[in-house]
Each structure stands twice: as C-alpha cells, then as structure tokens.
Amino acid sequence: MLKTAEIMPLTGALGAEVSGVQLADLVKRNDSSNAEQLFQMLVENKVLVFRDQHPDPQTHVDVAKLIGDLAPAVPMYPKVAGYEDIIIIRNDDDNPPENEVWHADMTYREVPIFASVLHGVHIPPVGGDTLWVDMVAVAEGLSAPMRQFLTGLTSRHTIQKGFSFVNENGQSDRAAELAETINREKATNHPVLRKHPVTGAETLFVNAAFTEAINELAADESDAVLRHLFSRIDNPRYQMRVKWRPGTVVMWDNWATQHYACGDHYPSFREVQRVTVSTPRYASLGLN
C-alpha cells in the first residue's frame, strides 16, 4: 500500500507529506512490509505528515505500534477514556499554552522516547502551528572546533525543569502527579552529541525544556554554551512548519528532531492527542 503513496518533501531540511494512504487501512492490513516502509520513511524524513485521517483512538494506538513499542504516557495530562496511552493536550480559556519552547519529548528518561504520533482533533481557524527542527543538521552546522569541544561531554536532563510551570501556576492536582513522577524519573545524563541509535547520525541532544546543565563544565560555562547551542536551533534553514487541519496526523523521530508548538491561537480552542513510542520496531534501516 505504501509503495503507491506519494511522498512530497516539505523543506530542504526535513519533513514530508504522505498522500494516497489511509493509516486505518495500514492497520487493518497488518502487513509487515507496510510497517517496514513506514519506519523507513519516518527515519529518512524525520517528520511525516498525513492529512484527512481522523483515526479513532484504537487506530491511533495501532498506528504507533507499527513503528515501535509504546512508552508510558506522561501522567500530568488527561487521557482519552479507555486509552491510557493517549494523552490529551488541550488549550481553552482554562488551559493556556504552557510550554512554548523548543524541545524533544521526555529526554529526562534514561532511554528517551523514539517517536511521537500526534492527531489534530480540534484545530483553531488561525494559529496553533507546530515547528520541527532537524537536530542532525544543527549538529552538522557546528564548526569543527565546537564539535570537537562538545565530543565526550554529557548533559543532565530533568522532568522538573520542563514542568516547572505546574508549580508556578498553582496547579495542585498536577503538582502532586509531578512530585510522584519526579520520584520515579530521576535526573539522567545523555551525550551532548548523541549518535542516533538507528541511523548512526550525530545529533545535538540538548533542549531548552529538559536540559539543566552540561556536567563537565562550571555552571556559568554550561549556561553560556547551552545558550549558544539553543540559539543554533533558531536558524530557519533547519526547520519546517505544519499548519494543522482537523484529521491531520504527524509522526516524528524524537531522536533526530525538536519541536515547538506555537500558542498564537489562544484563547481559541485547540486539542491534539498524542501517543509516544519508546523504542523502534527495527534496529537499523537494514530492518534487522
């Protein structure tokens, strides 16, 4: 089925829109060759956009399972009834956008999640776009001396940094869940320059949401280096942007990208639903 799909690159950096295929049909066919092709398309393009899908919750979960094993959902978000693997990210008068910052999902985990599958359920008429940035290209864009300097350095990632807004906004219910999660999700370290486990490509693996410090540097040195590295992400040549429509599904490689959800739609209502994939279905593009 995917052999006949049309794949249209969205930028020179990353991303492709896939047309001529319904994800629900991929799930129903349960064909390993389709799963292999979907996985290859994802890793090669880093972000895949599917329009006019409207998957039901079970299909959403099953599509994510085509590319790997599911990750436990973030506890601080509501879930779709009967589906603990699907979190609801909702903005309305009582829930303004919270986290307008470039980030990769859940890098505070010892094994960061491999991928996310996001479904646009309720989309505002204007605004609420999501941007992605190619962190392989960002790493390649660093000077040779900077890459040499960063090689061997590690950074500390924590959940409390990324979810500090929960306590700052006085969200008592979510604060209790956050405290419990912090007890389970201790700080973890990752290489600043990390090799992608599937492709072997070197990625810049620090993000403004969850990275607290570079361990081997003094605090002021770490802050200065991180500020510089974060500024490299802002270069538009490494980025792509998706304008959501109802029924849009986007899946992305969390090991190779970061993303940024624009809050310019607020206070218009917006709801997206996300399933995360912990580990890839295949160990390499050789699909072994």
Image (cartoon, rainbow, N blue to C red):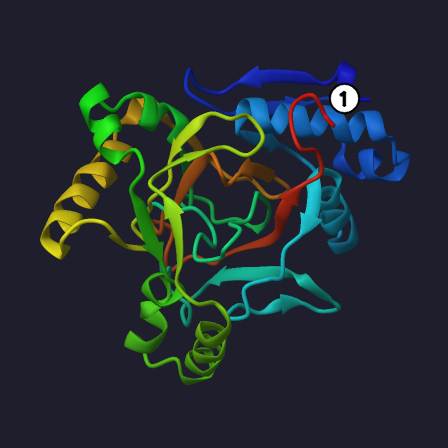
Outermost residue on the left side: it is 220
Q: Amino acid at mark 1?
A: Leu
Residue at (76% x, 21% y) in the render? 2
Q: Position of residue 287 (x, y in %)?
A: 72, 26
Q: Position of residue 288 (x, y in %)?
A: 74, 28
Can the viewer see residue 180 in this picture? yes
Can the viewer see residue 54 in this picture? no
Residue at (10% x, 53% y) in the render? 220
The one nearer the camera, 251 or 159, is 159
The one nearer the camera, 26 or 190, is 190
Q: Relative to 194, does residue 264 appear above or below in the rendering?
A: below
Q: Tell me the residue that label 1 is attached to.
A: 2
Q: Residue 163 occupies which quadrant of the picture?
A: bottom left
Q: Position of residue 236 (x, y in %)?
A: 29, 26
Residue at (43% x, 67% y) in the render? 186
Is residue 165 found left or right of 123 in the rendered image? left
Q: Residue 178 occupies which quadrant of the picture?
A: bottom left
Is residue 75 found left or right of 262 in the rendered image? right
**Quarter of the picture holding the N terminus:** top right
